[in-house]
Image (spheres, helix red, strand yellow):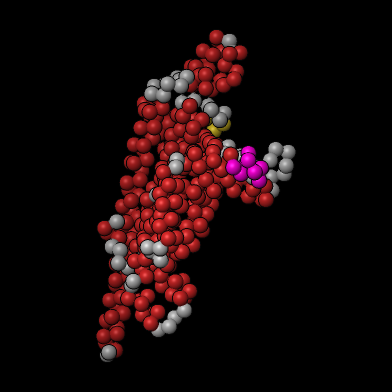
Amino acid sequence: MSATSIVVGGRSGRTGRRGRASAIGWLVVRRLGWLIPLLAALSLLVFALAELSPVDATAAFLGSRDEFVSAGGRANVEQAVTQLPWWQAWLQWIGGILTGDPGYSMSARMPVADVVSARLPWTVLLMITGLALGFAISIPLAMMAARRPHGLVSQVLDRVMWVIAAVPPFLVGLTLVAVFALGLRLLPSGGTSTPGMPATATELVRHMVLPAGAVAVGQLPWITLHLRKALIETSGDPGVRAARLRGVPEWRVLGRHILPGAMIPVLAITGARLTEVIAGSVLVEQIFSWPGLGQSLVNAALAQDFPLLGVVSMLLAAIALVGGIMSDVALALLDPRTDPREL
């Protein structure tokens, strides 16, 4: 190969890399362009649906004090809670969002910004831990099943995963509480620390085992089944066969050639499944009294707390949408066969 061809080849490679980076950047811009109008439309829908709720917002706000409040006091609370039609409340709320003031939460009795800043980290921690735990359990299971695709282990695993996929998340959570908290008394059933005990990292880990486990169980079927299929397909690649013919140890073939290639489609699917992870986390937070945004979302919906309901809904939707964007970007970066312009 001549020096000229090397230079031309190098320029061509750099041009190709710049073009691919530009296409990935345009993918991000294009997706973010859809993000804002989509979130605004979602918040409008949430306000409209909350208005149709049969729950008495005044009674929900007063709670156990409802029957002890005078008629005059109840009228004042009713005026404060339901003072505007839902569409006027949405216009007022969206105007506040644009000026950096998300409003005041009647159900939490504090500014919405304070509610979100206090609860968002707990939701993110639970989602990331549950998802990571799901991958940690699924990867060895999928690798074990992929060694003999038609063997007994693979067939049993396939049926077990389909059964788990049919179980709703709240039933998984209640089962874990019944077995490990109430039956065996090994783990606490809720909260982030035992009342009266110091809030240490050990206490937090003990209290997070069951809720994170419930989130992880909900993710096991799709991670395991997709990864097993990807492992079987990747095992037949020419590069893998060539490595085996060269005498490369099987553990190195698996770690360097098969598993990285098989993880690419699974990572792409992860972004699309984030909505399901968030929905499962909301239910899990209710069951285990986890102080995340899921609890605030349910409380705000019951009390028709429009400012908090709108902000929490938009945040959870934004997490799912941004996660999808990051997943597609990772797929475009890891897999040169993927065209970012087609994502």
Camera-side residue of 153 and 64: 153
Q: Residue at x 47, y 19 (%)?
A: 56
**x%, y% of residue 139?**
47, 61
- In the image, 280 versus 106, the foreground residue is 280
Residue 90, percent across and down?
39, 29
> Toward which corner of the image does residue 191 lie, by quadrant?
top right
- Nearest the viewer among 91 and 254 is 254
- Give above or below for 53 relative to 144: above
Classify residue 184 by image quadrant.
top right
Which residue appears at 48% of the width and 74% of the height?
A: 251
Magenta-tinted stretch: 179-186
Q: 144 and 248: which one is in front? A: 144
At a point 52% along the width and 45% down the height, the residue shown is: 214
Q: Is residue 84 left or right of residue 119?
A: left
Q: Position of residue 71 (x, y in %)?
A: 55, 9
In this view, 150 is above or below 80: below
